[in-house]
Image (cartoon, grey):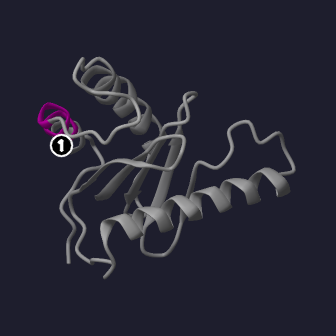
Amino acid sequence: MTIYNLYIFDKMGTLMHYAEWNRTKKSGITREEEAKLTYGMLFSIKSFVSKISPHDPREGFLYYKTNRYALHYLETPSGLKFVLNTDTAAINVKELLQQLYAKVWVEYVVRDPLWTPGTVVTSELFQNKLDEFVKQSPIFGIRNI
């Protein structure tokens, strides 16, 4: 199993943090353009799911899967959006995203007195803890090419 990359957006769609691990193919556009496209796609999918769901869409959109990758999504009550791209064999990603939020984001961003909400996260400590957390997860792996 493999983790490719992670986007963290605030409730307004601003890219707060981006990280990548085993991504082998680049998109050919800037990171900012890619983030805007990703956020726009999420906005559209969430809207579509809420309109056509035959059930109460309280859980809403959680992930989608193609034949090449899976996109996993977690939105916190405060509107923070975590988007993790993995290979298609990854399991229990919702729990991983919830732990990432509680154990890494809250501990090393929210509780950082130097961070101002609504600004991009530049903390090296957060980046190191995020990297450590992801690499220790059971779904992190090196892609076999």
Residue at (18%, 43%) from the top-left corner? Answer: 131
Q: Residue furthest right?
A: 54
| Magenta-colored stretch includes residue 137 | no
Residue at (40%, 60%) from the top-left corner? Answer: 89
Q: Is residue 136 left or right of residue 93?
A: left
Q: The N terminus lies in which quarter of the figure?
A: bottom left
Q: Main secondary structure of the magenta part?
A: helix
Q: Is residue 38 left or right of residue 122?
A: right
Occupied quadrant, residue 144: bottom left
Along the line of sight, which residue is nearer the eye, 135 or 106? 106
Q: Residue furthest bottom?
A: 28
Q: Is residue 122 left or right of residue 49?
A: left
Residue 6: give x, y in percent of width and height. 34, 52
| Magenta-colored stretch includes residue 125 | yes
Report whether residue 15 is seen: yes
Residue 50: give x, y in percent of width and height. 78, 50
Residue at (51%, 41%) from the top-left corner? Answer: 74
Residue 123: give x, y in percent of width and height. 17, 35
The stretch in magenta equals 124-130
Report whether residue 1 is seen: no
For badge 1, the amino acid type reads: Asp
Q: Is residue 120 left or right of residue 123?
A: right
